[in-house]
Amino acid sequence: MNAAVDADRPRPQVAVVVIGYDDAAHVTDAVRSALAQGPAVREVVAVDDCSADGSAGLLDRLAASEPRLTVIRRRVNSGGCGTPRNTGLDAVTSPYVMFLDSDDVLPPGAVDALLGAATGAHAEVAGGLCVRRELPSGREVPWQARLYALHAAVPRPAQRPRLVHDTLCVNKLYRTDFLREHRIRFPEGRFPYEDVVFSARVLAAAPRIALVPDRVYVWHVRRSAERLSISLDRAGVDNWRARTEACRQAYEILLGAGQKELARAARAKFLDHELRMYLRELGLRDAAYRRAWWELTRSHLAEYDADDWARDPAAPGRLAGRVVLASPEPRDLPRLRELAARPARLCPPYARAADGAPVWSDDLPQVSLEPLLTRPVRALPLAVDAELRPRARGARLRLRLHELYGRVARAGPEAVEVEWRHRDDWDAGVRATTRLAASAGGWSAESDVDLPALAAVGTGTWDLRLRVRFRDGVSREVTAHALAGAGLLRRSAVPGARHGVVLVQPYATHSGALALRVAPGVRGVLSVVRARVRRLLH
């Protein structure tokens, strides 16, 4: 009987490499989450990158009671994540290996899910769903959810170009011999975005890949941490320089391996992801940063060829990239910020060339917008303005949908669904539907906002999401551009029967969308004030 039970148990086949530097507060939680995966984990290799905060001592004490844990302490700090991962990889003796950062955790069952997929599909790589957990709120956002919606076996990466969008190394399990045979390693030293290059090297080797919808990695996002992670610390232009260099190397690796389709997809990903993300924040930077960023971006985009620009030419990232490439100096930043939003918003003015063709602006007529004339209505970058007017017990939301070169009128907008969605609890929402009425140059609608009712549902930030419905049943989800000006609702206290008073602060997000901060009662008001002070101090 015992022999039968032992036969059913997973064989210990997996090594988990945990890297950390001065992270005594979290590193043991990460290691324990790897050890808790069960008997499939043969070894956990913890690489301490010459910490000075006692991390190594904590790991040594844990290893004294856990024979599966090996601690390696580097004598000199590497300045990055690639070198300690390579150190751990060199020490691995198991058939499969995973990587884990010291401030993250593996959820229960992660290793079994990935190992079962890899062995079942005879795959060199298995990947699963990573969730970004915002702390302290606990809100979870799935990473590349479309890619991991279903179980799948991909014989060659070129058959699924979307794989280039997932540049994480930590939500995957790799066959150790595969990495060693193809000499796949991380860039050494201080090389930010080492995952981007490593992932390109993996795809270039054309492995068979298994995909699972299971949660296999929890990425903790601590925006209030004293030392931000590389992906969050984007305030200096060196961060953008490192990012573009990593993306450039990824493209060259894929192209050099004959993976032309994946190389094209990597360049498209840069436009849709990296470029849009940094454009949303560009208005927050000073003039020197903006000039340096613009110059670096133009230099990078100048390497693109005609085929790179020809694919889906109306995509927001490509339109934004063509504007940057066409202008020697930073320009149209508010409008580019709106175009970089998700969903994209193409705000007025809507210019035309001498022959009547739609163009970006009178100053940049060489940036054609003609591809918008044939883009499906459900994918158009519709622009909606939103303003909040104060009322006795709440506010009045006024919306204005802009025409877009005749496309909106032909589709026949009929109604707009208004939803206030709680940022930390997406299941919490307040919804209403209102008719759209034609007005000069567009369509308008109004909706009451019961601010005390929002406060009763939840304290915190509420985002405005809209869905425009057209006469043929097609709909388009959009966000609204926040208008500011005299007479509009500003931070104020609104009376409420339940809480006595509700503090409300409308504001524009980094992408220009309208959002509300709501705090009910005296305690809620104090919590908002404390949070504001913490942000200012940080």
Image (cartoon, rainbow, N blue to C red):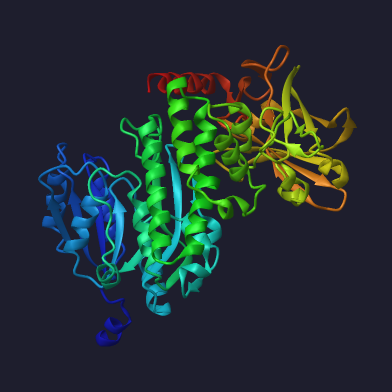
Q: Position of residue 254 (x, y in %)?
A: 41, 61
Q: Nearer the viewer, residue 89 or 134?
A: 89
Q: Which residue lies at the image location 14% right of the left edge and 63% below the top edge?
A: 67
The image shows residue 295, relative to residue 429, as above or below, that is: above
Q: Which residue lies at the image location 48% right of the left edge and 23% below the top edge?
A: 527
Apparent side of residue 91 relative to residue 395 in the rendered image (left or right): left
Q: Which residue lies at the image location 69% right of the left edge and 23% below the top edge?
A: 483
Asked which quadrant contains residue 351, the reply is top right
Q: Nearer the viewer, residue 187 or 456?
A: 187
Apparent side of residue 518 relative to residue 415 in the rendered image (left or right): left
Q: State how many labels appear.
A: 0
Q: Position of residue 236 (x, y in %)?
A: 38, 29
Q: Position of residue 200 (x, y in %)?
A: 39, 59
The image shows residue 338, relative to residue 503, as above or below, that is: below
The quarter in which the N terminus is drawn is bottom left
Q: Is residue 6 visible?
A: yes
The quarter in which the C terminus is drawn is top left
Q: Position of residue 229 (x, y in %)?
A: 34, 39
Q: Nearer the viewer, residue 357 or 485?
A: 357
The image shows residue 282, relative to residue 393, as above or below, that is: below
Asked which quadrant contains residue 171, the reply is bottom left
Q: Which residue lies at the image location 73% right of the left edge and 35% below the top edge?
A: 383
Q: Is residue 217 visible?
A: no
Q: Among all residues in the image, which is located at the extreme front?
A: 354
Apparent side of residue 311 relative to residue 113 in the rendered image (left or right): right
The image shows residue 331, relative to residue 11, as above or below, that is: above
